[in-house]
Image (cartoon, grey):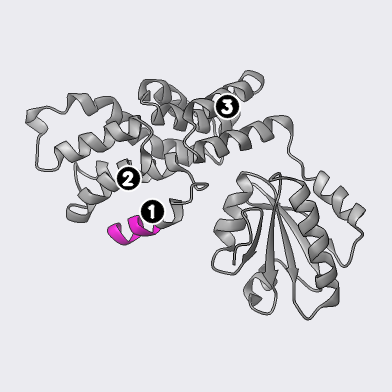
């Protein structure tokens, strides 16, 4: 049950998305506890208050240890309450047992991102809200200080695509540095290529789906990513191998442009999986 975007209850099923994936945007603090445990009941409101005061800088995810034994085993929770912090999908810090509010505050402050990281996080937030130009400005600011920052490069490429500038995105994607973001950059290239060629879809390539496909690519270039996804999905429902598999690759790329942060992302990914498999 979600009490806010900053404080949520998670389970075995949504932990990978709500904690690990989300921690690429901001630190996620996970409280492993139980209602029957006095220590957990004392620690929980302290953490909630500090998370609230952080005004979105952190997320708190609460795990009921009785209901989620696989998470308890995976993260070696031997006593409760246990607090574990994640950044970029990795466990980076932890506390065990009852702590004072000042100690908890110091723990949170140690997780605070560097200024460039914070700008990247803000840029991703703007992307999820469709503010493509604003996000591009933030990513360029980061890249002026750190030209090879892979998160900023990927964010800028996404914003270029959503603003209809595949010619600006392609150089970034084709010369992308080795990093954990590299596979996503590779998967964006088919979309950039297709968008660049969208106006050249001539009669020799025409088929029943060509107008819908070209329109979806134009929608993507106007920043209307959900509408573009809907158009490509309509094609894939009838022809999974449309244009020798290009439409499938474009659909995957559009989901990356939309981003894991977007509220529709999970539903679209589930739908694409059902369409293809």
The answer to whether marks 1 and 2 mark residues whose Cβ atoms lie closer than 8 Å is yes
Disc number for residue 6: none
Q: Residue at x 26, y 38 (%)?
A: 216
Q: Which residue is mark 2?
A: 229
Q: Residue at x 50, y 41 (%)?
A: 128
Q: Could you tell whether 215 is left or right of 100 in the image? A: left
User: Closer to the N terminus: mark 1 or mark 2?
Assistant: 2
- Measured as percent of width and height from the top left, residue 275 is found at 28, 58
Q: Which residues are magenta?
A: 269-277
Residue 249 figure quarter:
top left
Q: Quadrant of the N terminus?
A: bottom right
Q: Which residue is mark 3?
A: 139
- C-alpha separation, residue under disc 1 versus residue under disc 2: 8 Å
Q: Could you tell whether 79 is left or right of 23 in the image? A: right
Residue 120 seen in the current view: yes
- C-alpha separation, residue under disc 3 versus residue under disc 2: 25 Å
Q: Could you tell whether 62 is left or right of 196 in the image? A: right
Q: Residue at x 53, y 27 (%)?
A: 134
Q: Which residue is mark 1?
A: 268
Q: Quadrant of the C terminus?
A: bottom left
Residue 275 in the magenta stretch? The answer is yes
Residue 141 in the magenta stretch? The answer is no
Q: Residue at x 37, y 23 (%)?
A: 165
């Amino acid at each position: 049950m979600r009490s806010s975007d900053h404080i949520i209850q998670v389970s075995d099923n949504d932990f990978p998305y709500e904690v690990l994936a989300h921690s690429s945007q901001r630190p996620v603090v996970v409280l492993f506890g139980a209602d029957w445990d006095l220590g957990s009941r004392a620690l929980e409101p302290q953490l909630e208050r500090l998370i609230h005061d952080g005004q979105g800088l952190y997320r708190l995810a609460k795990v009921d240890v009785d209901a989620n034994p696989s998470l308890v085993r995976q993260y070696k929770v031997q006593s409760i309450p246990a607090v574990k912090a994640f950044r970029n999908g990795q466990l980076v810090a932890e506390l065990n047992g009852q702590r004072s509010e000042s100690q908890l505050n110091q723990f949170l402050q140690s997780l605070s991102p560097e200024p460039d990281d914070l700008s990247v996080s803000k840029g991703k937030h703007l992307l999820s809200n469709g503010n493509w130009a604003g996000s591009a400005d933030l990513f360029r600011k980061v890249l002026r200080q750190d030209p090879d920052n892979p998160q900023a490069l990927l964010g800028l490429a996404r914003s270029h695509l959503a603003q209809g500038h595949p010619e600006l995105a392609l150089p970034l994607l084709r010369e992308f540095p080795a990093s954990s973001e590299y596979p996503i950059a590779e998967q964006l290239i088919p979309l950039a290529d297709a968008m660049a060629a969208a106006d050249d879809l001539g009669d020799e390539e025409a088929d029943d789906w060509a107008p819908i496909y070209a329109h979806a690519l134009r929608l993507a270039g106007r920043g209307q990513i959900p509408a573009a996804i809907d158009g490509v999905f309509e094609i894939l429902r009838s022809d999974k191998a449309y244009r020798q598999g290009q439409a499938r690759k474009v659909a995957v790329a559009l989901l990356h442009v939309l981003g894991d942060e977007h509220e529709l992302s999970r539903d679209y990914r589930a739908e694409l999986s059902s369409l293809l498999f």
